[in-house]
Amino acid sequence: MAAGTAVTLVFSHPGYSEYHFLGATLALGMVGVVAVGVNLSPGTRTRDAHPDDVAVSNVFCMPARYRPGCPDDVYWISGLSGVQLWIEGWAYAPANLAATDHKTICVPGRCRPSSTRSRTASSATRTSGSTGCGDRVRIHRSRVSRLGTMSTDGVEVERPTRERAAIGEDGRSRDRSRPALPDPLPMSVVDAHCHLDIADGEDGNWLGAAEAIKLASSVGVTRIVQVGCDLPGALWAVEAAQQYPNLIAGVALHPNEAPRLQAAGEFDNAVAEIERLAKSSDKVRVIGETGLDYFRTGEDGRAAQHESFAAHIDLAKRLDKTLMIHDRDAHDDILAILDREGVPDRLVMHCFSGDTEFARECVNRGAFLSFAGVVTFKNAQSLRDALAVTPLDRVLVETDAPYLTPSPHRGQPNASYLIPHTVRKMAGVLNISVAELCGALSDNADRAFGGSW
């Protein structure tokens, strides 16, 4: 076995809902055992687990610094049902089993629960188990190497990085059936923001990248900006953009990631990794999504978000990438930080959510405003008013799939092939033909993202 390989063995007595586990972790160097951890601890059996999930109720960290090349921490894990053998040279360590049986992950180099009950980030994030993209998810194993030296080698773009929760923000179960194809658009357009790596469908079924691209192209959505909002998603986006000519990639740390990363002492390393990924391919055109999210992050997490936003602005300017901004309930601070740090040459307001005044302020700073399916909602008249005052040469369209599905399919799984619903609504608001809007959207995307692809 190669140096630096971590082996985790977890033994349990299957068939009981609560029982004790005997767990042992070995870090093996070239000449034997580096560290061994053994513990007897209660755990909780997991329901409805995906075969590739890592479901964990508690985690104990043990340093293994006795050989160069070994991970900084060796993970002893309890909480798995049955007998598991986990062998990876380095990976995102599983963390806690949340109350809803959805799984979260630890940042490499730190072994701790990442839910709101974590001692290190207890009040920075409001939603237990929430990710940067703002949803409870089931995390699958990521084949990634140690933080600071990650590679896209072996990243599987034929499987998702996570799964969207079946329960909506209103606390009710969503209709997870996949909507039918709409009528095709008369001209091709670009989905300016999408998360192809997030599964959403009946029983968690994933619309794979190849199928999603094929369906989108069949209705006139021929290009997609694939956005990663954490390190696993960023890795996936880079690899997917390399494999599929229809895609370009965006890489960043979502604002809701920043407080957790800072609390873990991993923020600087994570930003350095985003920079490395941004430099790794010409297909990486975007630094984003970054910005501020005051909806899910409390006051004590805002300083970390501000620092993260400034760091991403600096990256976009130094690397000549498009800056893509996530803004939720933070309009004034978004503008203030942009003015303080300096606006990059290309700026996109992802899922624009402001009013007419904010739209004008963003356009005055050179921004493109990207409108998602929200613009089709009955209660979004203020957003339609903002669209109406936005110059045609500054308008983009996006899905933010699998979220923000346009009417008449609100709440169901979103995908790029549903953009025609949004485009037709936008054309009506702008009082122009669908064909004229399609032409403008395609041209605008070329300018917003540094040229065609």
Image (cartoon, grey):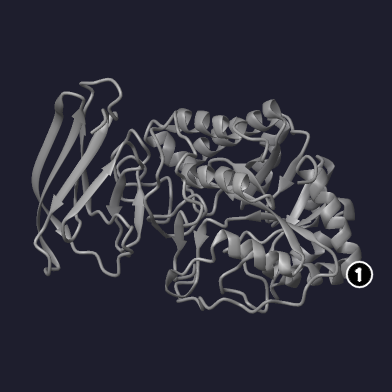
Up/down of 92 relative to 273, above or below? below
Kind of element beneath mark 1: loop
Up/down of 130 relative to 424, above or below? above
Residue displayed at 29% across by 54% down: 54
Residue displayed at 51% across by 42% down: 235
Q: Residue 165's spot in the image, x, y percent? A: 44, 66
| Quadrant in the picture for residue 13 | bottom left
Name the quadrant of the N terminus.
top left
Horizontal side of 386 relative to 154 (left or right) equals right
Residue highlighted by disc 1: 433
Q: Residue 197's spot in the image, x, y percent? A: 52, 56
State whether residue 353 appears in this view.
yes
| Quadrant in the picture for residue 341 | top right
Q: Residue 58's spot in the image, x, y percent? A: 21, 50
Nearest to the observer: residue 232 or residue 328: 232
Residue lying farthest to the front in this orientation: 1
How many numbered marks appear?
1
Up/down of 307 relative to 417, above or below? above
Horizontal side of 293 relative to 218 (left or right) equals left
Residue displayed at 19% across by 31% down: 28
Q: Residue 192's spot in the image, x, y percent? A: 71, 54
State whether residue 310 appears in this view.
no
* Number of residues whose C-alpha sits closer than 10 Å to that of mark 1, classed few (under 14), some (14–19) or many (20 or more): few
Nearest to the observer: residue 79 or residue 209: 209
Residue type highlighted by circle 1: Ser
